[in-house]
Image: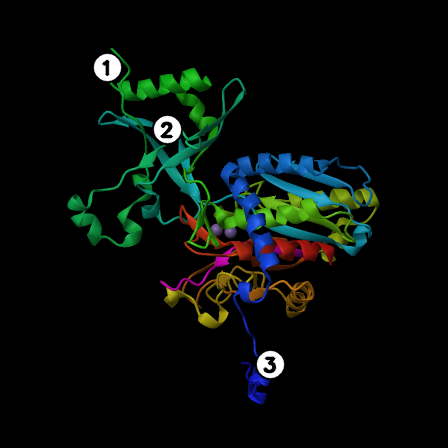
Amino acid sequence: MSKEKSAADKLREELFVTNKHMAKVVGDEEINKAFDFCKGYMAFMKTAKTEREAVKEIEIMAAAKGFVPFVPDKKYKAGDKVIYNNRGKAVILAVIGKKSLSEGVRISAAHIDSPRIDLKPNPLYEDSEIALFKTHYYGGIKKYQWTAIPLSLHGVVVKSDGEKVEINVGEAEDDPKFVITDLLPHLAYSQYEKKLGDAIKGEDLNIVIGSLPLKDAEGGDAVKLNIMKILNEKYGIKEVDFRSAELEIVPAFNPTDIGFDRSLIGAYGHDDRVCAYPALMAALNIDEPEHTVMTVLADKEETGSAGNTGLRSAYLKNFIYDLAAAEGVPGYRVLSKSECLSADVNAGFDPTYPEVLERNNAAFLNRGVTVTKYTGARGKGGTSDASAEFMGRVTSILNKAGIPWQTGELGKVDEGGGGTVAQYVADLDIDVVDVGVPVLSMHAPFEVVSKLDVYATYRACFEFFKA
Ligand code: MN
Ligand code: MN
């Protein structure tokens, strides 16, 4: 029984913003595509738990799609696919377009580092016949969330003879794992009195790595000695080699479906691999675009994008200048005509914690790719704030392609805030806006996203490249 719509209802439909659940807007086919796409994403997440591992995996995937290492000074032709590896921790993929570079390039930028816990340069010690690692956390973590969960160790050690040893312990089924201990509730009366942020201190994030003494060892530190012996036998390293290492502690969980309906994904490191993967797949799946397109997957976003693998470094600009020089175009002209989607996550509206987000301007799970005009904190400090013109341009691309999208704001005004790489891309004289996937429990060891949003973000990157 269909009821005739009233004039007011028709007018509401015509004039009001309506953000609907994607499942009410798209067909079953699109939902199936989204679930399929996310199988690939979850496989990627399983192998790419650090920026270095992500770069390795991306190089393999790119090679399979015909990408070859970038050669500066080489003149490329439309359809050529190149990849530039920045020190094993960041990467740029480019597909050369039919148009001259003087018409600018289309960039999708995301980051492949995630909040985690790094080992200190002198990490190994023994206390009370337990061997432990001292750590220094990386990025904004709620420290209490990282205790009493299984952890794995990833990274590289460069030995004094220059040999590089790769370490990955705690991911294979029968691998040992590691853990940060917490107090038992029975004896936590003083801990309970502390503020949440002070209950676990940075110096409390010590990793338990063993408890057996070296057999028949005289003197102290026999457990530490036994651990060092195991490490020496397996990796050929000595204690001094920790000083020239990058060893990262991450959760030992695998990505998994969440919910009876399997609509969500729980995983470590969605921020920002949940946008890096769609941006990557857009570059891998596009052939002979009009404009030259590039996906840049950066490191160090979680600590402010400083360092030569972060986006405040010149490597993206230099890469574009190299391409421009080969075509005889001034690099800065290419930059000023270029456009970028800064693909990063936003806070998803959490019904358990509604008080920190403002409903009219928050991003909701399953409502599609989030377009975030500005981030920042305290009066838009630390954001590039996309122009009305560029917001209009990007959202018209999404509308034309029928991609569900919503807007997002990182929390209520003066509730907190944060930034993305968008501001550093804007520094290059490029038009840029943030797009991405809303996340629940952002920066926790186990974050949650919706499969439909992941797919909408992929489609957004792909259609932007095509436009
Ligand atoms: Mn991020
Ligand atoms: Mn983050």
Q: CA distance from mark 1 to mark 3?
A: 80 Å
Secondary structure under tag 3 reads helix
Would residue 206 be counted in the magenta stretch?
no
What residue is shown at x 41% (from left), y 47% (from top)?
446
Which residue has dot 3 on it?
15
Would residue 346 be counted in the magenta stretch?
yes
Mark 2: amino acid? Pro
Q: Residues within 10 Å of mark 2 (few under 14, many from 20)?
A: few
Which residue has dot 2 on it?
176
- Numbered tag placed on residue 219 in the rendering: 1
Along the line of sight, the residue nearer the viewer: 149 or 317: 149
Q: CA distance from mark 1 to mark 2?
A: 27 Å
From the image, state whether disc 1 or disc 3 is nearer to you: 3
The picture quadrant where one finds residue 67 is top right
Q: CA distance from mark 3 to mark 2?
A: 59 Å
Q: Position of residue 225 (x, y in %)?
A: 32, 18
Rendered view: 392 above or below 145: below
Query: Which sits earlier in the primary sequence, circle 1 or circle 3?
Result: 3
What residue is shown at x 31% (from left), y 52% (from top)?
197
Question: Is residue 153 at all visible to an observer of this figure?
Answer: yes
